[in-house]
């Protein structure tokens, strides 16, 4: 089951020389090599940092690091990406091969999980000074006759429907795998017919499978991707005069066209550009506009496209489009680049020529006065024109802005961190805008961002948060309490770190939430983190947090990876190990003053590669295993000593990347398992040699491993890019542990042990639908 994708790369790209920011356009294109993209980004990174210790916001670095974290575990050892549709292909093969899997293990054919969602489903309470949220949205679509029925799409959380204008939500993703949605269209006459564009157009960390169709109002979905195949579709639009005609922009530089309701698709001429936005002329569907880093125009309904040069900026990394039926020949462009706004542009001749409306202030950045030079337009950029007054436009980057004179002057109308009432009014709207849509029935404006869904009924003055009920959180890591039932801490993509108490959530740390932990003996001590190893500690059961570790703080001189690993010693929870470039240790992480926690570097690994994972043996705190991003694995047998020594086990590793997860036998420190690429390997001699024990697990990324320490049959669970799987000593192979669990990416598994074995719970962090829990397998 070893992954190797060499056959999909027919062109050697390793010798190409890339421009300093070409990585932004290379990320979506899997013909390139992962390590080449990484190399080009590092050139840009060095130019941005210029000796700074703190990584600046709004430079696109965070978005790249998210992408790098995701794909670094999924490319092969040569940096080649998996074939398009690999996850769907492999999981369908697995289900086909195991359709009678229970009969293979007749003594264990009862009980395949009792999964239920923990949340957050109602929006979390907020214990921070920033605006928190439910999760990221990419698109908004309205029912053609009912103003209260709205559909939204999440990049890895599926399709959600409300019939009461956002008061309640229900998920509509039956039959989908990995649940990435970038666009939704609804048949205007027969609204039970719906189409979606699959994948994640803004972050590219969910696979795309082309266009899918539902004929029952979104209850079930089936592929309608003939010719386009399994690829991310950025946007899908329907001809307003003929619902059988649709256009879809794809990451491969083509626009796909159908005239028969998606039964077949025909590719346009090759544009060579990752076209993100596409829109019909409001009154002439023969004219179509499409944009990415360039602007292209069609006059034959999307069969062919020609690049528009006149007045269009050449320095943009991404350009968004808007039209208005009020002035059907007008077209707006919002162009963003590495330093924020490039400009707002308008055409009054149906996209033949464009004129600059403004290039200032910077409406793409964090500042409400536009005075900064930040922006991340490759990730969040959107523009909408009022359908009743084409001089009124709304734009979104980090914040929301508005113009009433066609973009000549721009005014900020929302602030990403909080609502401000004096001296100037700024509504509080979550950061990072991805969708702006006017309801054709009510006229209200709706906004989808990294926190969820907002709406304004008074022209952007006030905004209402409609996100509660959308269970779409993208969880990086979780930590469970062993002393308080139902107490779990979760770290989310761009929605902070939240604590769940009996399924009720409260956000306690802002930003991106990473590794989490709870002291196994005292739940007053709870730990969360932001990116690069900025670790926070609570001493009051999660009600407040203070920083205890980061580069250039408390003596630490190194930075960590995007998701920096740290572990509490299970035998002495006052001891914590953190993986930066080296292993750092504190023997009293519970010391009273957070700025008095003492850290000691206890390894001297060569190079500047970051640590991927670390594990402390539950039966012997001296035994520690560490994996690094340079394909290395190390072991220490005296990690609690004054001068620990380390054995390099990298030479014994199977060919592949570095271990993503390390799990040690609860009673034997020489017996361990690693998640390596798409496989699970076992060692019974402290990592000297390895055996592949993957059996017939699907050939997709294996992300997390957990061992049930109370099991008499050595029960284990693994989480993969789709699903949770179970094995014990009485089984020859793994079985799917799936009842009621959607086809989600599982990022972490942890077990919470109760006073009685029957009270034990298996918790799963998912990248798309939050936290889930299940009973364990019956022993």
Image: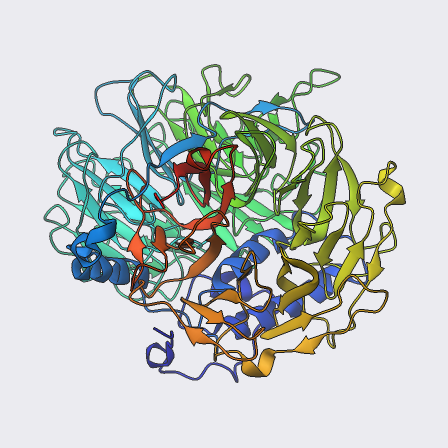
The answer to whether residue 304 is visible is no
Quarter of the rendering containing residue 435: top left
- In the rendered view, would you say 137 is above or below 10? above
Q: Is residue 274 above or below residue 541?
A: below
Is residue 119 found left or right of 366 in the rendered image? left
Identified at 61% across, 24% down, the residue is 126
- Say which residue appears at 22% left-offset and 56% top-offset: 105
Q: Position of residue 187 (x, y in %)?
A: 17, 34
Can you tell which quarter of the image residue 512 is in?
Answer: top right
Q: How many numbered marks, from 0 up? A: 0
**Image quarter of residue 558:** bottom right
Q: Is residue 297 visible?
A: yes
Q: Name the residue at 11% across, 52% down.
A: 263
**Is 634 positioned to the left or the right of 692 in the image?**
right
Residue 70 versus residue 605 in the image, above or below: above
Query: Residue 485, image x and y in percent?
Result: 54, 29
Q: Give the position of the N terminus as an image quadrant.
A: bottom left
Q: Position of residue 682 (x, y in %)?
A: 47, 70
């Amino acid at each position: 089951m070893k992954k190797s994708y060499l056959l999909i790369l027919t062109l050697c790209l390793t010798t190409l020389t890339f421009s300093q920011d070409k990585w932004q356009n290379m990320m979506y294109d899997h013909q390139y090599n992962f390590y080449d993209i990484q190399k080009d980004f590092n050139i840009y990174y060095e130019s941005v940092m210029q000796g700074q210790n703190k990584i600046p916001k709004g430079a696109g670095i965070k978005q790249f690091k998210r992408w790098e974290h995701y794909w670094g575990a999924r490319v092969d050892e040569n940096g080649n990406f998996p074939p398009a549709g690999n996850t769907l292909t492999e999981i369908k093969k697995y289900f086909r091969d195991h359709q009678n899997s229970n009969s293979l293990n007749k003594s264990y054919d009862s009980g395949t999980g009792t999964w239920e969602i923990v949340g957050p489903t109602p929006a979390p309470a907020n214990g921070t000074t920033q605006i928190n949220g439910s999760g990221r949205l990419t698109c908004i679509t309205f029912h053609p006759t009912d103003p209260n029925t709205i559909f939204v799409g999440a990049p890895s959380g599926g399709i959600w429907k409300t019939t009461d204008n956002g008061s309640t939500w229900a998920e509509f993703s039956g039959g989908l795998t990995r649940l990435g949605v970038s666009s939704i269209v609804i048949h205007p006459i027969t609204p039970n017919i719906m189409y979606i564009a699959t994948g994640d157009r803004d972050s590219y960390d969910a696979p795309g499978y082309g266009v899918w169709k539902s004929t029952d109002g979104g209850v079930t979905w089936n592929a309608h991707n003939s010719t386009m195949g399994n690829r991310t579709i950025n946007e899908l639009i329907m001809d307003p005069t003929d619902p059988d005609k649709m256009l879809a922009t794809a990451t491969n530089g083509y626009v796909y066209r159908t005239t028969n309701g998606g039964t077949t698709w025909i590719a346009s001429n090759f544009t060579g550009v990752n076209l993100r936005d596409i829109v019909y002329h409001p009154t002439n569907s023969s004219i179509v506009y499409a944009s990415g880093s360039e602007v292209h125009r069609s006059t034959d309904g999307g069969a062919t496209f020609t690049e528009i040069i006149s007045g269009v900026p050449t320095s943009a990394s991404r350009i968004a489009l808007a039209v208005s039926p009020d002035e059907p020949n007008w077209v707006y462009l919002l162009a963003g680049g590495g330093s924020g706004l490039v400009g707002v542009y308008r055409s009054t001749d149906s996209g033949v020529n464009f004129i600059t409306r403004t290039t200032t202030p910077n409406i793409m950045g964090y500042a409400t006065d536009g005075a900064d030079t930040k922006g991340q337009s490759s990730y969040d950029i959107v523009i909408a024109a009022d359908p009743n007054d084409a001089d009124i436009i709304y734009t979104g980057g980090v914040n929301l802005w508005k113009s009433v004179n066609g973009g000549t002057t721009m005014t900020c109308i929302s602030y990403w961190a909080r609502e401000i009432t004096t001296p100037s009014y700024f509504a509080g709207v979550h950061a990072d805008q991805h969708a702006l849509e006017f309801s054709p029935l009510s006229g209200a404006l709706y906004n989808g961002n990294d926190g969820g869904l907002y709406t304004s009924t008074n022209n952007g003055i006030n905004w209402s948060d409609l996100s509660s009920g959308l269970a779409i959180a993208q969880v990086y890591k979780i930590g469970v309490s062993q002393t308080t039932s139902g107490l779990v801490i979760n770290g989310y993509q761009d929605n902070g770190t939240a604590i769940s108490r009996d399924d009720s959530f409260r956000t306690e740390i802002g930003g991106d939430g990473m590794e989490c932990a709870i002291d196994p003996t005292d739940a007053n001590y709870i730990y969360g983190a932001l990116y690069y190893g900025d670790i926070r500690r609570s001493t009051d059961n999660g009600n407040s947090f203070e920083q205890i570790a980061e580069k250039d703080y408390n003596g630490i001189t190194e930075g960590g990876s995007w998701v920096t690993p740290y572990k509490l010693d299970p035998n002495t929870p006052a001891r914590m190990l953190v993986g930066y470039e080296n292993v750092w240790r504190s023997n009293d992480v519970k010391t009273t003053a957070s700025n008095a926690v003492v850290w000691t570097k206890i390894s001297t690994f060569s190079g500047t590669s970051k640590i991927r994972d670390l594990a402390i043996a539950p039966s012997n705190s001296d035994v520690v295993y560490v994996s690094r991003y340079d394909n290395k694995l190390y072991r220490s047998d005296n990690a609690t000593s004054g001068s620990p020594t380390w054995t390099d086990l990298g030479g014994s590793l199977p060919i592949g990347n570095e271990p993503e997860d390390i799990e040690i036998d609860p009673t034997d420190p020489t017996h361990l398992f690693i998640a390596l690429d798409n496989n699970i390997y076992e060692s019974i001699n402290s990592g000297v040699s390895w055996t592949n024990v993957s059996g017939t697990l699907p050939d997709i990324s294996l992300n997390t491993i957990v061992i049930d320490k109370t099991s008499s049959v050595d029960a284990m669970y693994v989480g993969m890019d789709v699903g949770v799987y179970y094995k014990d000593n009485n089984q020859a192979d793994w079985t799917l542990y799936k009842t009621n669990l959607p086809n989600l990416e599982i990022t972490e598994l942890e077990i919470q042990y109760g006073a009685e074995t029957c009270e034990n719970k298996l918790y799963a962090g998912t990248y798309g639908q939050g936290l889930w829990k299940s009973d364990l397998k019956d022993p």
